[in-house]
Amino acid sequence: MYDNWEALKTECMQCRKCGLCETRTNLVFGVGNENAEVLFVGEGPGENEDLQGEPFVGRGGQLLDKFLTAVDLDRKKNIYIANIVKCRPPQNRDPKPEEQDACIDWLREQTRLMRPKIIVCLGRISAQKLISPDFKVTKQHGEFIEKGGILFMGTFHPAALLRNPLQKPDALEDFLALKKKIKEVCQRTY
């Protein structure tokens, strides 16, 4: 357990718990307001994220930012964004279960320090790891599920929306539902 974000980040940046550390350019710890009440969690960094050391900075990140802006959220002001794994899997493949297991404690500590009221899982991998192993994004997106005093919602991964733009209206509905839920359960003004 860590007392503060700086100690956690310093330790995480030196992580060698799995083989992903061998091929990373940068460890991608996370970005945003460490006191936010809403945490977004993706699966892992892609090429652009590995190069820049920040989550969701490529084309998918640009799309995510548009959805965030549409509901008055901003990665620099009132949310935090992290991933299940902090290092890029080769060729942007899905992180293997053993890689997720090796890395998940970093996210648990981020969550413990942050104490979010809502966690938004971006994509299948994140939703299956954090909500339920049989979570189906195409069927259950936008639903809020309470676990341990935190509301979880799974939605489409921005990269999946780039591949299948017909799902963008459903994703926007999820973000509008999120905005409504934030007004219900969050203390701070969003």
Image: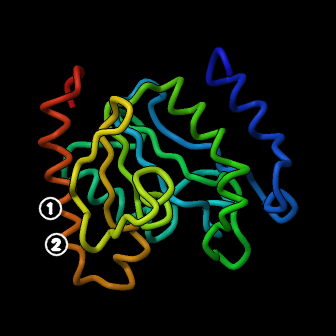
Q: Is residue 31 left or right of residue 102?
A: left
Residue located farthest toward the top when viewing the structure as drawn: 3
Q: Are marks 2 and 1 in contact (CB under 8 Å)?
A: yes
Residue under the point 41% across and 40% down: 39
Mark 2, residue position: 169
Q: Is residue 148 left or right of residue 184?
A: right
> Residue 185: percent from the left, percent from the top?
19, 29
Quadrant housing residue 1: top right
Q: Nearer the viewer, residue 100 or 173?
A: 100
Q: Is residue 70 left or right of residue 121?
A: left
Rendered view: 111 above or below 55: above
Rendered view: 177 above or below 4: below
Mark 1 packing: few (<14 Cα in 10 Å), some, or many (20+)? Answer: some
Rendered view: 1 above or below 59: above
> Residue 180: percent from the left, percent from the top?
12, 42
> Residue 187: percent from the left, percent from the top?
22, 20
Mark 1, residue position: 173
- The number of discs equals 2
Residue under the point 73% across and 50% down: 102
> Residue 140: percent from the left, percent from the top?
25, 64
Q: Distance from label 2 to label 1 (Cα)?
A: 6 Å
Residue under the point 16% across and 72% down: 169
Q: Which mark is residue 52?
A: none
